[in-house]
Image: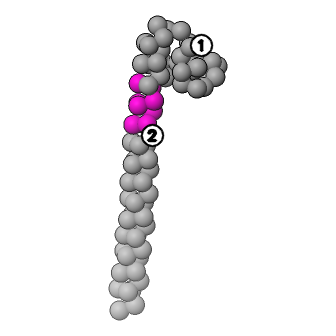
Amino acid sequence: MEKEMNRYKAVWQSRLKRDEHLKALKLKTGRLLWQKAVLSSLSMKWKKTLEMTNGNKTKGAQLLEISHRALLYKIKEYGL
């Protein structure tokens, strides 16, 4: 009887660990999807701003209210 209880306890604990792992994975996946969506919308904003300024990065940075250097970094990092 005690062996069965220990076995039941071990199975139950492994299921709890698995469920906790799945919850953490869902949160991480949701966070990654959210980050991708935000970056996608921001890169579209940066791209449209550069189109509006005919590729003038200084004016584009002013419109976006970021530094010229920050815009250059974003262009390089996101391949705009």
Magenta: main secondary structure: helix
Q: Dot 1 corresponds to which residue?
A: 58
Amino acid type, residue under disc 2 in the picture: Gln
Q: Residue placed at 37% from the left, 74% from the top?
A: 11
Q: Can residue 77 be spotted in the picture?
A: no
Quadrant placement of the N terminus: bottom left
**Dot placed on the residue nearer the N-terminal end, 1 or 2:** 2
Q: Dot 2 corresponds to which residue?
A: 35
Residue interval drawn in magenta: 37-44
Q: Position of residue 10 (x, y in %)?
A: 41, 76
| Location of residue 77 with respect to 27 vertically, above or below | above
Q: Which of the 4 image quarters holds residue 26?
A: bottom left
Q: Which of the 4 image quarters holds residue 47?
A: top left
According to the image, what is the colour scheme of the structure?
A: one colour
Q: Position of residue 15 (x, y in %)?
A: 37, 69
Q: Can residue 20 be spotted in the picture?
A: yes
Q: What is the spatial separation of the Cα atoms under label 1 and label 2, in whole angstroms?
A: 27 Å
